[in-house]
Image: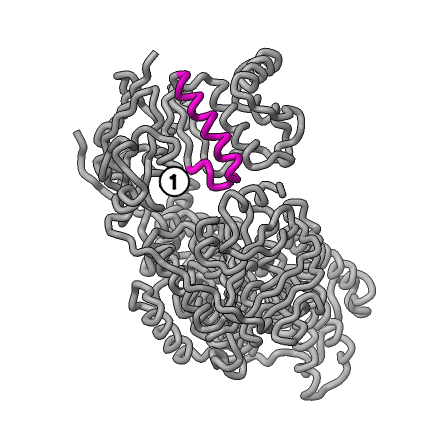
């Protein structure tokens, strides 16, 4: 007989083990899917998860993809820890990219050390402005931040579309939907010759350290934590709960905006239609897979980044559509949520009963 | 026709707690049975088993020799077991009749006739076509009882039915219950109020820590003997010292109003009172009459006109709770788990919720964990919180220990005024005694208390002055030694 028993208290070990279990189950299920559609499961998984990062170039691509995921997920962890469901990071990323790209275009013929900081700052501010919309509507008009932040994603994508096709399109660009190239001063430096990994990774690492410090060491972080658990308690303690909500949205928006800056000022160096392959949505999975903990988010962003690379390799070598990557991302989240059940319940084998 | 209900060897185990330990009981119609015990003694579990809400791990239930399989509340209903819960399960915005027809299979017309005849028979007068939210607590309870009676129950279980009733409503309820009993309905009455057991019941079963400790005839018992059985030890009685006559005014409320945008909250209407140093002002009332709003206005969770609250010669109506704490006020809210503490956080983190500038918990925006932990250890030892691990999540403290922690957190900073709301709600007798002793001690140190409580006995025991809140209005302030619980009951019900 198998019995499901409620745990006396959620297990700390299980809390960190379930993400690993979820990844394992994803691999098994992924292998099974490959088998069903007629591939050798182990070979396919090898193409998906090992081949892409087998050389230096692949590894740098991994970091390149993990950077925005990590940055956005860190920002989202502020929101999610305080029970604010910002799922519009993709929109905040896009809007951050629009604002920083706009600023970079102003300086397109100029050089100077001061340009890059302004461009970066503009991206952060753009993300914050865009995130402030659901935050203010939530705190002062009681709207649901899930709906508002999600719908704003499509608004920002349409704005971007309009700009790169219309007013901002490159006059010498043969009507391609893209802007001029930014000047070198407006671009994040590439770290190694021949690889695409750029200085944006330092922004992500700085965000990791800062979020750890704010959450575990400061009064501000303590107030966010309390407000997240219970607004009633926050009110009773005398914290300004509404300001706290707006603040976490702003932090989250700034991080997403910075990720947007990295996408356009890094290797690409111009604004174009597809700024992000849904990093803003995938980062939600990263945040939860990393248990909203800064260190966990680093590992989670690397793992999820592989699914992007693997999908590309698989498309090239096995002629599988690259959307398989999203299938894997979906499975990770699915298995993570399912195995979270084990946090609160345990399975007990009681032997046969008469 | 006689009804015989038998509980045989029922056991229900929860992780870390045996809620019912091999309980066997037998009931026969024609009598009213009391099931007596402290909070956590296991009486609610037993009753939930009888009503199909919980399935026991072991044991059987027989109704007239038939073994009942109670897997859901519906099974209980089908087997003619009716239950009135402590918290009403009514839709506030629907009419009384709509509420009654929801779980009935009968036609509107025949049901209406049936309800009319029930109301006539037992002298209930309730307008069936007004929304439930316009009813008093006593009337809502009658609706719940009618809902059971429609099904012609053999057994009627009442779970702590008087906790929301006035004295008058309580005696009406008792009359009805006696009538039901005469008609052959078996009545099981769950309570921890000894006086009611003596008034109403014929037999009493006492439970303690999941076990049945005694079954006896009421005529062989008295209040003291039952109390000792219930608690398992001889209780010492607490005596409040005679009130010192102090004329040094600490807090003065004038013309305080609060109009809520939320239709489920109560507006406060022209509240005026003052409290002197060393005095305890009790505010009585049936819950939902504005106590929660009054507490929030006093604590600063709801801001009011600056001049409406004068405290120690400062006007503080527009200050938030944290700013008020700096003036040496302390607050203990009603809801321990959702407001006064955060169950998912460690004990020491909960201690940091009450933060003074001078306590240095947070320096330059950084958490000073050592300071907080040091402070927490002191609270735990000074206020007898039964743990030595301050990193324990507070959800693992019992209600009593959590309340000691909260009261300790608020008191260790030596405030001049403590405002507390139902401080002993849901606690066992030992913890209640401890909290009461602590509150008396505060008064003896010339500090003041505003005690908002729905427990009349507690108010009479601790207060120097008492006022009653009814529909957001405060009655005249009376001296506690001139007030009786009957008088309070009348005022609580809105009478004069």
**In the drawing, does residue B20 fall left or right of residue B268?**
left
Query: Which residues are drawn in magenta?
Result: B160-183
Majority secondary structure of magenta residues: helix
**Disc 1, SS:** helix
Q: Position of residue B47 (x, y in %)?
A: 35, 33
Q: Nearer the viewer, residue B376 or A329?
A: B376
State the residue position of label 1.
B195
Residue B4's image quarter? Answer: top left
Is residue B179 rendered magenta in the image? Answer: yes
In the displayed structure, A217 sits above or below B433; it is below
Q: Position of residue A193 (x, y in %)?
A: 53, 80
In the displayed structure, B472 sits above or below B403; it is above
Number of marks in the image? Answer: 1
In the displayed structure, B78 sits above or below A112; it is above
Picture quarter with the N terminus of chain B: top left
Parent chain of label 1: B
Instruction: Identify the colour scheme used.
Output: one colour
Q: Position of residue A28 (x, y in %)?
A: 36, 48
**In the drawing, does residue B188 fall left or right of residue A79?**
left
Residue at x-position 62% and y-position 41%: B495
């Amino acid at each position: 007989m198998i019995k499901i028993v409620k745990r006396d208290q959620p297990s700390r070990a299980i809390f960190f083990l379930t993400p690993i279990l979820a990844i394992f189950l994803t691999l098994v299920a992924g292998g099974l899917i490959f088998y069903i559609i007629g591939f050798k499961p182990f070979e396919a998984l090898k193409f998906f998860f090992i081949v892409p990062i087998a050389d230096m170039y692949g590894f740098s691509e991994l970091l390149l993809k993990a950077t925005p995921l990590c940055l956005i997920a860190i920002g989202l962890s502020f929101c999610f820890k305080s029970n604010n469901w910002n799922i519009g990071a993709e929109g905040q990323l896009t809007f951050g990219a629009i604002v920083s790209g706009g600023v970079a275009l102003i300086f397109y013929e100029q050089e100077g050390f001061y340009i890059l900081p302004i461009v970066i700052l503009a991206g952060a501010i753009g993300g914050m402005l865009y995130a402030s919309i659901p935050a203010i509507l939530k705190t002062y008009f009681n709207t649901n931040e899930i709906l508002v932040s999600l719908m704003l994603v499509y608004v920002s994508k349409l704005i971007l579309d309009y700009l790169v096709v219309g007013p901002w399109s490159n006059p010498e660009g043969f009507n391609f939907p893209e802007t001029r190239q930014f000047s070198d001063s407006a671009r994040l430096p590439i770290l190694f010759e021949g690889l695409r990994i750029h200085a944006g990774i330092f922004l992500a690492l700085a965000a990791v350290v800062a979020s750890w410090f704010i959450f575990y060491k400061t009064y501000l972080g303590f107030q966010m934590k309390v407000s997240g658990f219970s607004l009633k308690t926050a009110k009773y303690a005398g914290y300004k709960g509404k300001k706290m909500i707006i603040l976490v949205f702003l932090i989250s928006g700034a991080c997403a905006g910075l990720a947007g800056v990295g996408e356009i000022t890094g290797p690409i160096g111009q604004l174009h239609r597809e700024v992000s392959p849904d990093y803003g949505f995938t980062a939600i999975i990263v945040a939860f897979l990393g248990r909203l903990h800064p260190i966990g988010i680093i590992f989670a962003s690397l793992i999820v980044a592989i699914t992007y690379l693997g999908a590309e390799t698989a498309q090239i070598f096995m002629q599988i559509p690259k959307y398989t990557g999203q299938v894997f991302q979906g499975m990770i989240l699915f298995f993570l949520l399912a195995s979270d059940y084990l946090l609160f319940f345990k399975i007990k084998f009681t032997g046969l009963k008469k | 026709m006689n009804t015989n209900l038998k509980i045989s060897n029922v056991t229900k185990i929860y992780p870390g707690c045996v809620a019912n330990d091999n309980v066997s009981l037998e009931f026969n119609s024609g009598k009213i049975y009391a099931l007596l015990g402290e909070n956590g003694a296991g009486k609610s579990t037993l009753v939930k088993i009888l009503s199909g809400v919980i399935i026991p791990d072991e044991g059987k239930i027989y109704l007239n020799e038939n073994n009942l399989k109670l897997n859901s509340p519906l099974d209980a209903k089908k087997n003619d077991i009716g239950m009135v819960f402590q918290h009403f399960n009514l839709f506030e915005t629907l009419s009384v009749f709509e509420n009654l027809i929801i779980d009935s299979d009968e036609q509107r017309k025949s049901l209406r006739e049936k309800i009319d005849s029930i109301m006539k028979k037992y002298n209930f007068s309730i307008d069936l076509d007004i929304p439930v939210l316009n009813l008093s607590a006593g009337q809502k309870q009658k609706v719940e009882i009618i809902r059971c009676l429609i099904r012609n129950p053999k057994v009627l279980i009442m779970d702590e039915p008087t906790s929301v009733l006035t004295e008058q409503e309580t005696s009406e309820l008792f009359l009805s219950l006696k009538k039901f009993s005469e008609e052959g309905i078996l009545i099981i009455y769950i309570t921890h109020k000894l006086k009611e057991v003596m008034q109403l019941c014929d037999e009493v079963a006492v439970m303690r820590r999941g076990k049945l400790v005694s079954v006896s005839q009421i005529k062989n018992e008295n209040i003291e003997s039952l109390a000792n059985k219930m608690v398992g030890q001889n209780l010492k009685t607490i005596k409040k010292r005679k009130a010192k006559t102090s004329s040094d005014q600490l807090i003065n409320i004038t013309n305080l109003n609060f109009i809520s945008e939320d239709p489920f909250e109560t507006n406060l209407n022209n509240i005026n009172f003052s409290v002197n140093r060393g005095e305890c002002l009790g505010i009585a009332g049936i819950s939902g009459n504005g106590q929660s709003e009054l507490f929030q206005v006093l604590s600063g969770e709801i801001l009011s006109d600056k001049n409406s609250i004068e405290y120690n010669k400062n006007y503080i109506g527009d200050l938030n709770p944290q700013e008020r704490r700096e003036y040496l006020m302390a607050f203990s809210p009603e809801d321990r788990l959702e407001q006064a503490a955060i169950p998912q956080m460690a004990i020491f983190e909960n201690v940091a919720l009450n933060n003074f500038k001078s306590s240095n918990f947070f320096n330059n925006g950084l958490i000073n964990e050592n300071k907080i932990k040091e402070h927490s250890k002191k609270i735990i030892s000074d206020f007898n919180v039964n743990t030595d691990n301050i990193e324990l999540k507070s959800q693992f403290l019992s209600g009593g220990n959590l309340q000691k922690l909260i009261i300790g957190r608020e008191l260790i900073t030596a405030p001049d005024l403590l405002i507390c709301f139902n401080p002993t709600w849901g606690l066992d007798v030992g913890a209640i005694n401890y909290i009461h002793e602590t509150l008396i001690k505060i008064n003896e140190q010339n500090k003041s208390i505003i005690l908002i409580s729905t427990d009349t006995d507690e108010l009479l025991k601790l207060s120097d002055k008492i006022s009653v809140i009814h529909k957001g209005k405060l009655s005249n302030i009376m001296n506690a030694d001139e007030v009786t619980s009957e008088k309070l009951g009348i005022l609580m019900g809105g009478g004069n």
